[in-house]
């Protein structure tokens, strides 16, 4: 079995957990595109900023980001 099929099976198997963490459809599509280019790759992944907050006041700045990272890899 190619890594691509195994990874797709794992994504489906853990779809609920991935949704709860905040993995977006865009991240899934980017990962799927990586599999299309190289179906037997040992690992792939992507990251996306899903929420961002930036505020400035009186010479100070507050910044916060929520970044979701999805990595799929073959462990030996």
Image: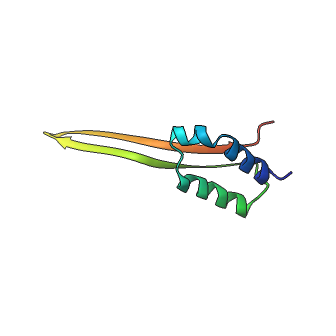
Between 3 and 5, the residue placed more toward the observer is: 5
Farthest right residue in view: 1
Report which quarter residue 62 is drawn in. Answer: top left
Task: Tell me: 51 left or right of 72.
Answer: left
* Residue occupying image coordinates x 74% and y 47%: 9
* Residue occupying image coordinates x 60% and y 58%: 29
Task: Tell me: 70 left or right of 75.
Answer: left
Measured as percent of width and height from the top left, residue 54 is found at: 28, 44
Between 24 and 2, the residue placed more toward the observer is: 24
In which quadrant is the C terminus drawn? top right
Measured as percent of width and height from the top left, residue 34 is found at: 67, 58
Q: Is residue 12 above or below residue 26?
A: above
Between 19 and 3, the residue placed more toward the observer is: 19
Between 13 and 30, the residue placed more toward the observer is: 13
Farthest left residue in view: 58
* Residue occupying image coordinates x 16% and y 40%: 59
Report which quarter residue 16 is drawn in. Answer: top right
């Amino acid at each position: 079995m190619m890594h691509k099929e195994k990874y797709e099976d794992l994504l489906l198997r853990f779809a609920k957990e991935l949704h709860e963490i905040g993995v977006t459809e865009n991240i899934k599509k980017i990962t799927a595109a990586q599999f299309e280019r190289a179906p037997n790759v040992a690992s792939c992944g992507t990251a996306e900023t899903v929420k961002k907050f930036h505020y400035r006041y009186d010479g100070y700045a507050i910044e916060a980001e929520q970044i979701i990272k999805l990595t799929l890899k073959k462990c030996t």
